[in-house]
Image (tube, grey):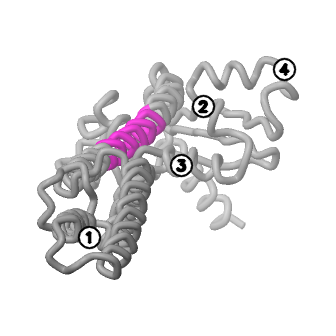
Amino acid sequence: RKFIVITVMIVTMLSVTISLFLPLWYKSTTTIMIPSGGGNSFGGLGASLSSFGLGNVFGGSEDQLKIMTILKSKKMLELLDEKFDFQAKYEEKYKFKTYKKLKSNYRVEVGEEDQIFISILDTDQNKVADMSNYVVHCLDSLNIAFNTSKAKNNREFVENRINITMDSLSFYENKTTDFMEENGIISLNEQLIVEVEKAAEMKAEIMAQEIELALKKEMLSPQNQQIKALEISLNLLSAKYDDFFKDTSNDKLLINLGNVPNLQKQFARLKRKVMYFSK
């Protein structure tokens, strides 16, 4: 009994003595409430969170995970160290050791109602509350920065796609213009209608002159001037008709009818490209 009493007294005295030399630690906890169905069910809470830049990320496990990731990130530790100089407070030479100690005194937990508790332990009673509040301030700033960065990336992506599309559109517009100039195309469909009608008229006239020539050869002698005049006229008319199907035609308004299917196909493809990039 004597041994037990003496041991208890010694241990008690040592504990009291040591506790007097140990610094006091203070804990500050900030709670973030996450509305489950939107701001209306929580009165003005949703609007309050929106004013912090957090309203658009709450309301689901994915948003909660995003917030937890921000709170537990190395960036958050860096911001706290920059603000309150934990490296000097912990008397550490290297940053990674400072962050390790800070991380051991920094708690982020999720409650039963999906609220998030942010707690910080520190020996400075006057600053510990400022530290936990500063975490919420940094959460707000980082969240806004991430959302802004995402919006910027989306805008840059869209602008880049628009620039590429505009370049492609300009390329095919110029290519279509060059194709029209090379092939004498003003309005392909209208030119074909006029040209086919003209060719049909010339073909009909050739056939009529051929019939007339055949009849005159039956009635007149081969040396007759009328027969010679009809032969010359028929040869000129046939040569002119053949120009519709030759690439050597000097008439820029004429389209080579022999190449019409290929021209229509190429022209249709170019117009389709222009229409595609325009849309």
Q: Earlier in the sequence, mark 2 or mark 4?
A: 4
Q: Position of residue 254 (x, y in %)?
A: 25, 55
Q: CA distance from mark 4 to mark 3?
A: 50 Å
Q: Amino acid at mark 4?
A: Gly
Residue behind mark 1: 245
Q: Amino acid at mark 1?
A: Phe
Q: Earlier in the sequence, mark 2 or mark 3?
A: 3
Residue behind mark 4: 43
Q: CA distance from mark 4 to mark 1?
A: 82 Å
Relative to 24, say whether 2 is above or below: below
The range drawn in magenta is 145-165
Residue visible at 75% across and 47% down?
Answer: 111
Q: Position of residue 2 (x, y in %)?
A: 67, 64
Callout 1 secondary element: helix
- Front position among marks 4 and 3: 4
Q: Quadrant of residue 226?
A: bottom left
Q: Position of residue 96 (x, y in %)?
A: 27, 54
- Front position among marks 3 and 1: 1
In this view, the residue in front, 51 or 117, is 51
Q: CA distance from mark 2 to mark 4?
A: 16 Å
Callout 4 secondary element: loop
Instruction: Check if mark 2's residue and mark 3's residue have beta carbons within 8 Å.
Output: no
Residue behind mark 2: 54
Neighbor class of circle 4 (other Cα within 10 Å; few <14, some 14-19, many 20+) is few
Callout 2 secondary element: loop
